[in-house]
Image: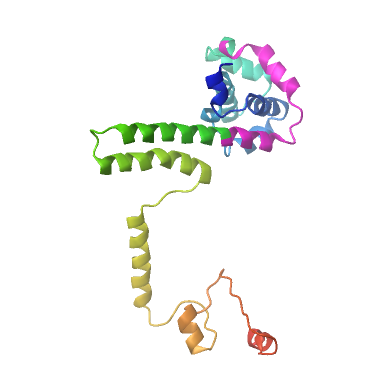
Amino acid sequence: MSTETNLIPHSRQAEEAVIGAVLINPDVYIELSEFLSAEDFYIHRLRFVWQAFARLVERRVPIDILTVSESLEKQGQLEEVGGAAILVGMLNATPTTLHADAYGQIVREAAVRRQMLTAANKIASLANDQALELPLATEQSVAALEGAILRETGGQLVPLRDALGQAFDQIDALSRISELPGTPSGLIDLDHRLGNFQAGALYVLAARPGLGKTSLALT
């Protein structure tokens, strides 16, 4: 393995352990596929194996050495993977399926870090492109980071303009309501400050001893 390859975030042991764990217990694939995809594997031949798992699950065919080998053979990928012997080797080398989630998280984290490096290289290229207008370079830089951020958080980025628009719409809607939403406390000043008690919100009642915190909370 070259020095350059060693510098790229990845774990051959974790990737092979993930494959081996699925071959031992196919149910592991269902769990790991919730956050892992074929593109998360740095070792290209293991991407083929993960794709074979997906095809078999989609067709409701049991996952084992034979079915995976046949699926790879039909795609013309078995030889590139290294043959059925490689699959057997990964199965035998996997210490346990109990830690499959941890192996998968290692693979996922390395994949996100590779995305970050790709984004960083693109941003550096954009920054050095003097012919590119700064606003456009900035926009493309943000877009380059977006993929890695979304991959890590599993969320969805919302432009500030849209978020502010939604907030103002909510404020406007509330201003049109004669009564505040939520449950009133009976204390007018408190209700105006809090906007009534809202379901799912956490409220902390604090004061020095003997000032009636318990009585207030109970009433």
Residue drawn 54% across and 26% down?
Answer: 8
Prevailing secondary structure class for the magenta stretch in the rendered image: helix
Relative depth, front residue between 177 and 158 = 158
Q: Which residues are magenta?
A: 80-109
Whether residue 42 is visible, yes or no, is: no
Residue drawn 55% across and 13% down?
Answer: 77
- The colour scheme of the drawn protein is rainbow
Q: Residue furthest top?
A: 79
Q: How many marks?
A: 0
The image shows residue 148 at horizontal and vertical percentages of: 47, 39
Q: Is residue 14 above or below residue 3?
A: below
- In the figure, is residue 69 to the left or right of 167? right
Q: Is residue 47 above or below residue 207?
A: above
Residue drawn 37% across and 34% down?
Answer: 124
Q: Is residue 182 above or below residue 71?
A: below
| Res. 2 image quadrant | top right
Residue 87 part of the magenta-drawn span: yes
Residue drawn 50% across and 79% down?
Answer: 196
Relative depth, front residue between 170 and 12 = 12
The image shows residue 127 at horizontal and vertical percentages of: 33, 36
The image shows residue 18 at horizontal and vertical percentages of: 66, 29
| Res. 108 image quadrant | top right
Relative depth, front residue between 193 and 173 = 193
Quarter occupied by the C terminus: bottom right
Whether residue 104 is visible, yes or no, is: yes
Quarter occupied by the N terminus: top right
| Res. 205 image quadrant | bottom right
Residue 216 part of the magenta-drawn span: no
The image shows residue 68 at horizontal and vertical percentages of: 63, 19
